[in-house]
Amino acid sequence: MASRWIRIDPAERMADGLRSIRAEAGVPEAFPPEVEREAADVASRPRSGERVELPFVTIDPPGSRDLDQAMHIERRGEGHRVSYAIADVGAFVTAGSALDVEAHARGVTVYAADERTPLHPLALSEGAASLLPGQWRPAVLWTIDLNVRGEPTATSVVRAEVRSVAQHTYDDVPAELSELLREVGARRVALEEARGGVRLAVPEQEVEREGDGWTVRYRVTRQVEDDNAQISLLTGMEAARLMLAAGVGILRTQPPPDERALRRFRLQVEALGVRWPDGMGYPELIRSLDPSVPAQAALLHEATGVGRGAGYVAFDGEPPAEHEHFSIAADYAHATAPLRRLQDRYVSECCLAAGAGDRPPDWVLAGIAALPAAMSAGGRRAGAVERGVVDLVEAMLLEGRVGETFEALAIDDGMVQIRDPAVRAQVEGAEPELGSEVAVKLLAADPAARRVEFTLA
């Protein structure tokens, strides 16, 4: 899943470059015919289960068809009941089948600026397995009761059939649901801040044609997006708790950032003119950044690289020695996007078993140890695409400015942070002293090669 959302308008102007990025990263172009046939076959088979007659709705970006989550929220006394339906991919995919093998080879859906390469064929990901409105769909249904502080007091996980009554975008969420989401979201954010979590509200980066050049703007996430994300985080934390208690599962973990990463980020903060008060910790700084301010939005993008090192840890027996997620400041599991992440299907099965007091199915126990490697491989491909798009965008922004001089700050070995535009770049043949103010001259900006080249002025 992308950590930096970049949109290029018009994307057609960069179609060749984006195609090359995917090819270099080894992203597959199409599904094998036997996988498409199997997907069409399993999609055509009717599914039945216990139907839950709640008015679920989905909230996704406009035009989305791969709908992983549908929700219903109601007040219960001073607290709330969150009913969260997750697409039940396991109802369609059989272990060892062509679909399953291909999903293991892909690992994740890969996003670029112009299109995405899905984990599953569209017959499933945008059809029979997607929680599309007006359709009864198999789902893994989480029911989480929250007290007045937003803390879980009871959690159940069962298989069910659900039906979404409406597909909303972030712009048209009904007022009643928006109010409930705000109540739950505010309480969950207060708990997050109390435990020291890092709320990284990364804005979408919009690169648009302007005259003969390009410009970058940032789309600030809406409050309802942040509140919606808190429901997913809540579910992931409960999934981790259930699996740790049961002694089997797979967690999303992240170590604390190393000193070098924090030092570089501190210098980037200085370079972009943002104040980092003495005594303020990294989580507090991140929460204080305003994504509507371009320099601070750029820092939020850069912060996605500070917490690198996140990975997956599978266990069967004793919990792993390192099981916490630094940014979330809690145990956590990816649990809510099985249409787009392979391992979420395994998490659903582990949590269903834990909720019933059983061991997971044999195919889960047999396959869980290999999941971290499969997810790592898929993550590397997705990361290579993301880096390629960032390099392409930076070259686009600087094209036509060759020969100009820019103010910058040295932030790492041979690396500088330019103030405007907010580009991080290597300086050829020089390693200015860390933290020093420098002037750099742009020697080349080649979008085709996705390369910019600077030297000290």
Image: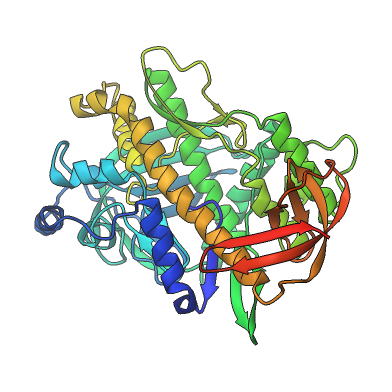
Instruction: Say which of 77 and 274 sits in front.
Output: 274
Q: Position of residue 456 (x, y in %)?
A: 81, 56
Up-down relation of residue 8 to residue 76 (above or below): below
Extreme residue in the front direction: 429
Q: Position of residue 87 (x, y in %)?
A: 31, 50
Up-down relation of residue 397 to residue 419 (above or below): below
Q: Is residue 28 left or right of residue 319?
A: left
Extreme residue in the top direction: 318
Up-down relation of residue 339 to residue 421 (above or below): above
Q: Say which residue appears at 52% left-offset and 42% top-offset.
A: 233
- Residue 95, quarter of picture: top left
Is residue 171 shown to the viewer in this render? no
Q: Position of residue 156 (x, y in %)?
A: 37, 34
Quarter of the image for the C terminus: give it: bottom right
Instruction: Say which of 320 and 416 sits in front.
Output: 416
Q: Say which residue appears at 45% left-offset and 71% top-offset.
A: 62
Q: Is residue 363 left or right of residue 171?
A: left
Instruction: Say which of 290 and 261 sits in front.
Output: 261
Q: Say which residue appears at 13% left-offset and 41% top-offset.
A: 97
Q: Is residue 11 left or right of residue 340?
A: right
Is residue 152 shown to the viewer in this render? yes
